[in-house]
Amino acid sequence: MTLSRWAFVATLVLTLATLAFPLALFGSPPNLGSAPMAPGFQTPILALEFAEDIDDIAFLRGDDAAALRAWLVDVQFLDWFFPVAYAGMAAVFFLGMALRGRFLAVIGVGLALATIPADWQENATINGILAEIENPLCGEDIEPADGRDDVVLRDCLPRGYFDEASAEAELVSYAFDTFLPVRIEMLRIDTWIKWGLIAAYAAWLAAMLWMDRRRILAIPAAVGALSIAATWISGSNGHVAELMGILLIPMMLTFPVAAVMYLRDKPAKTGTPTGEDSA
């Protein structure tokens, strides 16, 4: 087998892994707590990723949401591997195209691979949010008895907590009694870096398939990229974000479908030692 064929076969293998995570491992979330998700959201993970302020994560707070938080912790653990599957699927597909002489596909390889650390960074921020909700930095049981109205984060933490902290963290400690608003702002940045990269390689996939005269296949990829752009423009509207999640499914399935079509093709002879020969 040629190198490009191995890449397209790897695309199919990683497609199975991509489908296995949400279908077999993530499962269904438990019932929500006492607070509803932000308007339009039906999926807890999307509602958390696109939270804009602390009110948007109210559905995760309190004893009634303990089961949901525990489920999200499990999902977050699995999500360290999920990006390797879905972004790896895209990367090896673009690699297969590059090995067929479509050298611009190398850009797609880079965009897809960059999604993996971007997703990991988002996971780390989400883990910080879940950890602080589960173990608040401040609470009635640890607040000083006197001067309640003057309590700041520094007063709620053990002695020496900031001994090795950065100057920025120490400054923030005087301003907040919780890091959740800061973490949510960090999550907004991390989330849009990840989704921006996915939109970029979806758009690049559409362009490559269009140039390769596989224009029907280019449509789901283009729609997927546009749905992410629409979510950005809408200000993370819940209805638009949920629709985006649905429209990204056919975009992701474009990779294995296109891989099968390229496997059925005969690679063109180029006369150069690219590792390809005719099938």
Image (cartoon, rainbow, N blue to C red):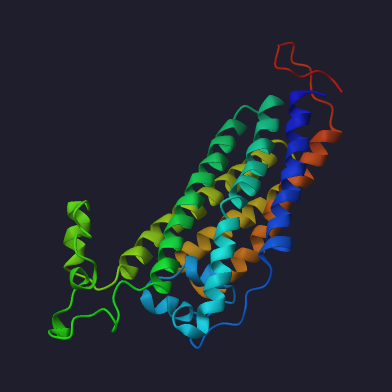
* Image point (73%, 52%), residue name: 253
x, y (%) of residue 123?
Answer: 49, 57
Q: Is residue 241 visible?
A: no
Quadrant containing the N terminus is: top right
- Drawn side of residue 78 relative to residue 231, left or right: right
Q: Is residue 48 visible?
A: yes
Residue 131, quarter of picture: bottom left
Residue 14, quarter of picture: top right
x, y (%) of residue 133?
Answer: 41, 73
Residue 108, quarter of picture: top right
* Image point (77%, 40%), residue name: 259
Quadrant containing the C terminus is: top right
Name the foreground residue: 169 vs 272: 169
Residue extending farthest bottom: 34
x, y (%) of residue 187?
Answer: 41, 61
- Drawn side of residue 211 relative to residue 38, left or right: right
* Image point (65%, 51%), residue name: 221
Residue 38 vertical position relative to residue 220 in the rendered view, above or below: below
Q: How many marks?
A: 0
Name the foreground residue: 130 vs 7: 130
- Drawn side of residue 190 relative to residue 279, left or right: left
Residue 227 vertical position relative to residue 260 in the rendered view, above or below: below
x, y (%) of residue 140?
Answer: 28, 84
- Drawn side of residue 104 relative to residue 7, left or right: left
Residue 63 vertical position relative to residue 22 in the rendered view, above or below: below
Residue 202 vertical position relative to residue 23 in the rendered view, above or below: above
